[in-house]
Image: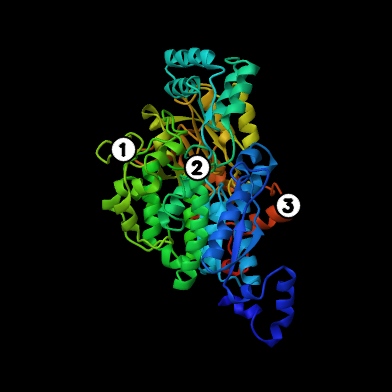
């Protein structure tokens, strides 16, 4: 056992003394030591219920013959960090999560790991650590939140839906209609705030929606980043079948916690390690599921970063190639016309059912649960053909995302194509340029953005942000103010899984690295074509050369603390925004 290095031999008497001081029994000294990384906290809805799951994980570990040792891992709620300085820390915290798990596992020579996680950056951070350490490890995601229920403002919302429909705004009409029926999710609070600003609802009606949107523990109910990553973790085989969609508040999630602890002990005996599971095939299967579900574009950051730790190369081109092959078969909220929440996907058969639909395209590989990927797909059963449609009757013929390239994004950018209105898939407009999210938000709220414009938000990439903030405020405000089919938004920042409309993120290279987005000026024409995967800045090359000669790298926005160190080492979004040691850059930080 790895743990023998600190508990066996005469010279380890002081180590044993410390372990005895922790309450470890003599009998436990002969068992495998299992670290349980728990991201429990009081400030993240997806994580507040983890104390209960910890008990069941512990029971499973002891039933399997191990000794459990819990340690804490940080967790940032993207929603609470949104729109202020806190969002700079969100993506950057992924590295801290990975480093914490690595440090604890190596310092205490654990024989295996159970990784209890749920929300946006915590799940990929833990997977990065598992791949880096390559000791037996299994993930359990704490589960999605149930949808909210309230019809207190039903009459006004029904009227609002009819008004939106009359105005031709199908997205807002469908959202208001769903809310009128009493079906609420977290992202509705953003739309409600925009409606209140336009005096379409009252303060009291806004309060009703706010209170109903998040009824309790769990990751936000739609196919946002947290639930997308939970689904892809299961699709890769790093959590047990059914784990991703089992609701946070259900008894099934408790049973799954017990089974996860017990299964980890079998993995220790089998010496089944993450790199045997997270192969190229596993990552490609994850991308297939991602496209079938219309998942968050943040996976274009996270999967390559996890793969890097596993020694696997996952180019962003894979996302686009697979998108052209895999149809979008699950129209999950917060999609523009969606009505299905995570609980509906669970009742329809969960990820095993999605794998069953995709079976002909899947590649086989081992999974943490002991079955192979194709065996899980064989056992999957679709229980609702409308939630998980057949391949010959998809919601969209292509998958949920697309990678675009052109002179404005030579290294690529990403769009959630399943959330783009048909009439916006080909768009040309004039640039409105902002050097921060705050400046863009102020302009949108001040009604300074007009139809036919492209909102450009730059210096928000991994280095320039620093931390590559989510642009959910600007995108949701554009939608909430009825401009979703008239205005595009591009940024070197990133988006939430809630983003809808023609919103392109991860523009690479980013502005802070001197990418072409840094050269855009007010009034420039920008052309976007989702179908041909192109994004072009229609400015003569000679003019761009002149602008480049005059461009100067701006002063860093943050010069001290963790974010300053992060910014000096982080790479482009096109490579997953990973942090590399200085020696990989010849001792010079990347520019």
Residue 197 placement: quadrant: top right
Q: Please name the residue that numbered disc 2 is placed on.
A: 247
Residue 136 location (% of width, % of height): 50, 68
Q: Number of numbered discs present?
A: 3
Q: Position of residue 515 (x, y in %)?
A: 53, 48
Circle 2 or circle 3, nearest the eye = 2
At mark 1, the secondary structure is loop
* SS class, disc 2: loop
Label 3 crowd bin: few (<14), some (14–19), many (20+), radius 10 Å: few
Q: What scheme was used to colour the molecule?
A: rainbow
Looking at the image, is mark 1 or mark 2 earlier in the sequence?
Answer: 2
Using the image, tell me which numbered label, if any, was put on residue 559: 3
Q: Position of residue 176 (x, y in %)?
A: 49, 21
**Real-space Cα separation, disc 1 to disc 2, in angstroms:** 22 Å
Q: CA distance from mark 1 to mark 3?
A: 50 Å
First of labels 2, 3 by sequence position: 2
The answer to whether 488 appears left or right of 388 in the picture is: right
Residue under label 1: 389
Compared to residue 6, the image places residue 477 above or below, namely above
Of circles 1 and 3, the one toward us is: 1
Q: Toward the viewer: 392 or 13?
A: 13
Q: CA distance from mark 2 to mark 3?
A: 42 Å
**Where does the C terminus fall, quadrant-wise?**
bottom right
Residue 435 drawn at (x, y percent): 62, 38
Residue at (54, 32) in percent of width and height = 187
- Few, some or many residues within 10 Å of mark 2 (<14, 14–19, 20+): many
**Within-10-Å neighbours for mark 1: few <14, some 14–19, many 20+:** many
One can see residue 294 in this view: no
Circle 3: element type:
loop
Q: What residue is rendered at 61% in x and 22% in y?
A: 208
């Amino acid at each position: 056992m790895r743990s023998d290095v600190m508990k066996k031999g005469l010279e380890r008497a002081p180590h044993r003394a410390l372990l005895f001081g922790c309450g470890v029994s003599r009998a436990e000294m002969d068992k495998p030591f299992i670290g349980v990384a728990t991201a429990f906290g009081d400030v993240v809805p997806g994580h507040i219920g983890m104390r209960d799951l910890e008990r069941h994980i512990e029971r499973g570990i002891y039933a399997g013959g191990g000794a459990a040792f819990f340690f804490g891992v940080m967790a940032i709620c993207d929603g609470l960090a949104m729109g202020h300085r806190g969002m700079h820390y969100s993506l950057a915290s992924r590295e801290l999560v990975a480093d914490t798990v690595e440090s604890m596992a190596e310092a205490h020579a654990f024989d295996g790991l159970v990784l209890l996680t749920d929300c946006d950056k915590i799940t990929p951070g833990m997977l990065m650590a598992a791949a880096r350490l390559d000791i037996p490890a299994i993930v359990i995601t704490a589960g999605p939140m149930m949808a909210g229920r309230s019809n207190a403002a039903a009459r006004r919302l029904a009227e609002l839906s009819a008004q939106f429909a009359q105005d031709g705004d199908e997205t807002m009409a469908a959202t208001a209609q769903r809310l009128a029926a009493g079906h609420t999710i977290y992202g509705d609070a953003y739309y409600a705030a925009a409606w209140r600003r336009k005096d379409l609802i009252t303060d009291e009606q806004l309060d009703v929606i706010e209170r109903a949107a998040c009824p309790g523990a769990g990751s936000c109910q739609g196919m946002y980043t947290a639930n997308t990553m939970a689904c892809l973790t299961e699709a890769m085989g790093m959590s047990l079948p059914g784990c991703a969609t089992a609701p946070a508040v259900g008894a099934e999630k408790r049973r799954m916690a017990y089974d996860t602890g017990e299964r980890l002990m079998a993995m220790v005996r089998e010496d089944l390690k993450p790199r045997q599971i997270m192969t190229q095939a596993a990552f490609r299967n994850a991308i297939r599921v991602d496209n079938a579900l219309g998942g968050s574009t943040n996976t274009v950051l996270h999967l390559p970063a996890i793969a890097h730790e596993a020694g696997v190369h996952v180019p962003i081109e894979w996302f686009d190639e697979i998108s052209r092959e895999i149809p979008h078969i699950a129209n999950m909220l917060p999609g523009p016309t969606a009505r299905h929440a995570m609980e509906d996907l669970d009742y329809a058969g969960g990820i095993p059912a999605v794998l069953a639909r995709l079976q002909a395209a899947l590649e086989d590989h081992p999974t943490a649960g002991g079955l192979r990927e194709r065996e899980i797909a064989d056992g999957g059963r679709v229980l609702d053909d409308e939630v998980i449609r057949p391949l010959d009757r998809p919601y969209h013929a292509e998958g949920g995302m697309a990678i675009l390239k052109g002179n404005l994004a030579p290294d690529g950018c990403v769009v959630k194509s399943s959330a783009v209105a048909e009439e916006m898939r080909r768009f040309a407009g004039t640039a409105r340029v902002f050097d921060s999210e705050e400046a863009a938000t102020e302009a949108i709220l001040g009604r300074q953005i007009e139809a036919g414009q492209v909102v450009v938000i730059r210096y928000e990439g991994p280095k320039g942000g620093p931390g590559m903030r989510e642009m959910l405020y600007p995108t949701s405000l554009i939608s909430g103010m009825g401009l979703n089919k008239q205005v595009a938004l591009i940024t070197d920042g990133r988006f939430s899984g809630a983003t809808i409309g023609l919103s392109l993120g991860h523009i690479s290279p980013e502005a802070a690295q001197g990418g072409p987005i840094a050269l855009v000026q007010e009034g420039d024409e920008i052309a976007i074509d989702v179908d041909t995967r192109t994004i072009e800045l229609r400015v003569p090359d000679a003019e761009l050369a002149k602008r480049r000669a005059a461009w100067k790298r701006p002063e860093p926005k943050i010069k001290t603390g963790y974010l300053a160190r992060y910014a000096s080492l982080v790479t482009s979004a096109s490579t997953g925004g990973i942090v590399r040691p200085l020696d990989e850059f010849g001792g010079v930080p990347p520019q």
